[in-house]
């Protein structure tokens, strides 16, 4: 099995090394193609107005001056054009990608692009909290991911579906289990705007995350991580809402 590893935190991110270790627990045929710099939050964007610069860091390790989506395309269509990967692992992201995060996440986007190219894909993310942002439990995903991936691949991933996996903020020995969960929702106050002044007293702004308390819904990825469970959520590329589609079809079929 040939595995392509990518991420959105960049070629030097510690989570990328963890993801490569996970891949090597599954096969010896591992290739790494990751962004030259941190691309967190770029979602499923493409570099259409800038050239893609490719740098070989070491054998089978490449950096691309572009987004995670660019990296997967470059890996599949250029670097591995003669023998495409059988699996793409995107991550391990520094921080969870659950609920609304998946719409912003470059990690999830790497898996999305692989899925669009017809390749099974996992997005892997490791949760952390304010108290351990400099001591992340990377061993959680590194320990638990290989067996989880084997089980999911054995069961099969339908075409047009990717698997979003999030590891809880704890050592592997403290993980309670695995929860197959739906994508949760935190609420409308996800972001806040911080206004500041530079050295010349000109205003500038930072996007910040809201820390307002909320109750995670039962059966969601949010609830799974709160319970120290690994969250596994299959996501569909086809975002059509079929009940609404049916209602609108009936609406426009009326005389």
Image (tube, rainbow, N blue to C red):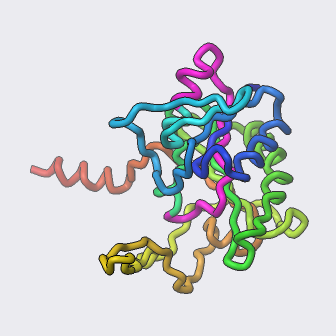
Q: Hey, which quadrant is residue 157 in on the image?
A: top right
Determine if the magenta segment contains residue 6: no
What is the x, y in percent for residue 206? 42, 72
Residue nearest the observer in this picture, 66 or 2: 66
Residue nearest the observer in this picture, 227 or 243: 227
Q: Quadrant of the N terminus?
A: top right
What is the x, y in percent for residue 54? 55, 29
Residue nearest the observer in this picture, 150 or 29: 29
Q: Which residue is pictured at 48% across the width and 40% down the height?
A: 66
User: Does residue 39 lie above or below 98 as drawn?
Assistant: above
Q: Hey, which quadrant is residue 193 in on the image?
A: bottom left
> In the rendered image, is residue 122 in sight?
no
User: Does residue 91 lie above or below 213 as drawn?
Assistant: above
In the image, the segment drawn in magenta is: 73-100
Determine if the magenta segment contains residue 83: yes
> In the rendered image, is residue 199 in sight?
yes
Q: Which residue is pictured at 59% across the width and 30% down the height?
A: 55
Left or right: residue 96 compared with residue 253: right
């Amino acid at each position: 099995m040939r595995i392509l590893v990518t991420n959105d935190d960049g070629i030097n991110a510690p989570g990328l090394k963890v993801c490569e270790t996970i891949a090597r627990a599954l096969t010896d045929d591992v290739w790494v193609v990751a962004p030259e710099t941190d691309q967190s939050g770029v979602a499923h964007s493409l570099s259409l107005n800038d050239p893609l610069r490719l740098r070989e860091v070491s054998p089978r390790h490449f950096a691309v001056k572009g987004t995670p989506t660019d990296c997967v395309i470059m890996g599949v269509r250029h670097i591995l054009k003669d023998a495409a990967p059988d699996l793409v692992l995107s991550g391990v992201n520094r921080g969870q990608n659950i609920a609304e995060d998946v719409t912003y996440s470059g990690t999830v986007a790497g898996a999305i692009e692989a899925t669009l190219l017809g390749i099974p894909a996992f997005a892997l993310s490791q949760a952390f909290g304010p108290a351990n942002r400099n001591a992340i439990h990377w061993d959680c995903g590194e320990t638990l991911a290989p067996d989880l991936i084997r089980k999911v691949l054995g069961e099969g991933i339908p075409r047009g579906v990717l698997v979003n996996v999030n590891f809880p903020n704890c050592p592997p020995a403290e993980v309670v289990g695995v929860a197959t969960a739906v994508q949760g929702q935190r609420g409308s106050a996800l972001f806040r705007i911080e206004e500041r002044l530079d050295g010349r007293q000109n205003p500038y702004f930072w996007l910040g995350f809201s820390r307002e308390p909320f109750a995670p819904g039962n059966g969601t990825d949010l609830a799974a991580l709160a319970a120290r469970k690994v969250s596994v959520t299959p996501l569909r590329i086809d975002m059509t809402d079929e009940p609404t589609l049916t209602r609108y079809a009936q609406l426009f079929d009326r005389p």
